[in-house]
Amino acid sequence: MRSVLDIIMIILNLYYWVVIANVIFSWLYAFNVINSRNQFVASIGQALYALTEPFLKPIRRVVPSIGGLDLSPLILLLGVIFIQSVISRYLYQIVW
């Protein structure tokens, strides 16, 4: 059981960094820092979108943009941190 929790924690940690990469990529894309017509850049953008959008879309329905600022990635990151803390504080103690 402990190894399953470790794998879940690793996946959550990786997803945390995917969300951060998506935010940085969207900023670079919005300010034309990266070439949006490059096929490699487009494939990275599509992969990040496909990984993050299933969780960001429901959050965007509930939380509106504030002055054009999308707060849904921040809420998603807080959710990931919350799940990690619940696992580390409560579920690891049950396993031991």
Image (cartoon, rainbow, N blue to C red):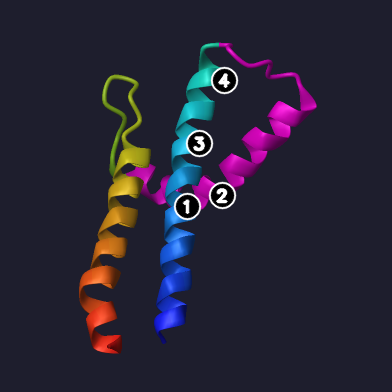
Q: CA distance from mark 2 to mark 4?
A: 17 Å
Left or right: where does residue 39 sit relative to residue 8? right
What residue is shown at x 66% (from left), y 38% (from top)? 46
Q: Position of residue 35 (x, y in %)?
A: 68, 15
Q: Nearer the viewer, mark 4 or mark 1?
A: 1
User: Where is 70 relative to 27, above or below?
Assistant: below
Left or right: where does residue 71 sit relative to residue 31? left
Q: Nearer the viewer, mark 1 or mark 2?
A: 1
Disc 3: which residue? 21
Residue 23 is tagged as none
Other residues around mark 4 within 10 Å, as few (<14) / some (14–19) / many (≥20): some
What residue is shown at x 48% (from left), y 62% (from top)? 11
Disc 4 is placed on an element classified as helix
Disc 2: which residue? 51
Q: Name which of mark 1 and mark 2 comes first in the sequence.
A: 1
CB within 8 Å, label 1 to label 2: yes
Q: Is residue 19 magenta?
A: no
Disc 4: which residue? 29
User: Where is 7 relative to 79, above or below?
Assistant: below
Dominant SS in magenta:
helix
Q: Amino acid at mark 3?
A: Ala
